[in-house]
Image (cartoon, rainbow, N blue to C red):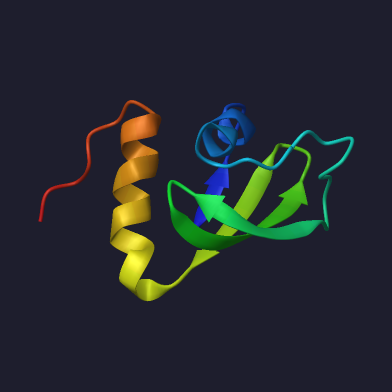
């Protein structure tokens, strides 16, 4: 999944323990960590900031719901 925009870094940092500040985790950097108890690989794509968050398919729904909740949005129904 892709996470981008002005609040992307803060959203991810809300659920993980690594420092995503651009001075240490700039474009092209990657790290394996946990986000909301799901094991993920985070890739920094650019300075917008934009990230790819790779997660096992069995955790994708859980992580998407957690991210939407943490961002203050309602999860899509269906």
User: Where 48 falls versus 43 (above or below)?
Assistant: above
> Which residue occupies 36% across, 63% down?
60
Quarter of the image that includes the C terminus: bottom left
Report which quarter residue 8 is drawn in: top right
Report which quarter residue 52 is drawn in: bottom right
**For the image shown, how many numbered marks are present on the structure?**
0
Query: In front: 62, or 51?
Result: 62
User: Where 67 falls versus 73 (above or below)?
Assistant: below
Report which quarter residue 66 is drawn in: top left
> Which residue occupies 77% across, 47% down?
46
Q: Indicate the position of residue 68 as horizontal and vertical percent values.
A: 34, 38
> Does 77 sit left or right of 17 as displayed?
left
Q: Indicate the position of residue 31 as horizontal and vertical percent values.
A: 72, 59
> Does 45 sit left or right of 67 as displayed?
right
> Given the current orientation, which residue lies at the most extreme bottom position?
57
> Which residue occupies 83% across, 58% down?
28
> Given the current orientation, which residue lies at the most extreme left position?
78
Q: Indicate the position of residue 58 as horizontal and vertical percent values.
A: 32, 72
Query: In front: 26, or 38?
Result: 38
Query: In front: 8, or 31?
Result: 31
> Does 61 sit left or right of 13 as displayed?
left
> Which residue occupies 69% across, 42% down?
18
Q: Indicate the position of residue 15 as horizontal and vertical percent values.
A: 50, 39
């Amino acid at each position: 999944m892709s996470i981008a925009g002005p609040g992307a870094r803060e959203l991810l940092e809300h659920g993980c323990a690594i420092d995503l500040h651009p001075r240490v985790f700039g474009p092209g950097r990657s790290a394996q960590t946990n986000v909301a108890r799901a094991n993920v690989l985070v890739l920094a794509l650019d300075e917008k900031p934009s990230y790819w968050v790779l997660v096992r398919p069995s955790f994708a729904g859980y992580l998407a719901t957690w991210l939407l909740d943490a961002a203050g949005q309602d999860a899509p129904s269906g």
